Image: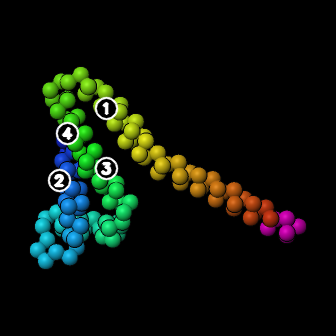
Amino acid sequence: MCWWAITGLTHLIIEASLLFTPNYLTKENPSFFDEIWKEYSKADSRYATGDTTTTAIEVIAVFLQGPLSLLAVYAIASRKSYSYILHPFYFWTYFVGANSPWVVIPMLIAIRSWKLISQASQSCKVNQD
């Protein structure tokens, strides 16, 4: 339950500050959250440039993941029957669904690269013979 609460509050407080303060890099009197995003932008420059894909992902995190995480806290704390549905739903949609492209796409690229390297190696071998 603590993990759900921390996740929900992180999305709603820290990540929402990025959406509602897009000029955090140029502010003369930056807030604590502006400083957090400046540090984060050093690791991922897409946040500093206002990349639309990154912003879209943050919108999903702020308006869906944050409230749903806090809904899970409420459901668990008040022993609601739907709390048992939230864990598998979260696992399959967020953990498996949202993260599967990070496994599938690199694997497809690696397979394609392996085939191209193998073809190039075979053509070099044929030309040497």
Residue identified by numbered label 3: 60
What percent of the width, then of the height, locates residue 114? Answer: 66, 57
Q: CA distance from mark 4 to mark 3?
A: 15 Å
Tell me the mark number nearer the camera, choosing from 2 and 3: 3
What percent of the width, then of the height, locates residue 80? Answer: 20, 24
Indicate yes or no whether the magenta region holds residue 125: yes
Tag 4–tag 3 contact (CB < 8 Å)? no
Q: Amino acid at mark 3?
A: Ile
Mark 2 or mark 3, which has the lower sequence index? 2
Mark 1 or mark 2, which has the lower sequence index? 2
Q: Is residue 89 above or below residue 107?
A: above
Q: CA distance from mark 4 to mark 2?
A: 12 Å
Secondary structure of residue under mark 3:
helix
Residue identified by numbered label 4: 70
Q: CA distance from mark 1 to mark 2?
A: 23 Å
Q: Is residue 112 above or below residue 23?
A: above
Q: CA distance from mark 3 to mark 1?
A: 19 Å
Tag 4–tag 2 contact (CB < 8 Å)? no
Quadrant containing the C terminus is bottom right
Secondary structure of residue under mark 2:
helix
- Name the side, left or right, on which 101 lies relative to 25: right
Mark 3 or mark 1, which has the lower sequence index? 3
Secondary structure of residue under mark 4:
helix
Residue identified by numbered label 1: 87
Q: Amino acid at mark 2?
A: Ile
Tell me the mark number nearer the camera, choosing from 4 and 1: 4
What percent of the width, then of the height, locates residue 21? Answer: 20, 65
Residue identified by numbered label 2: 13
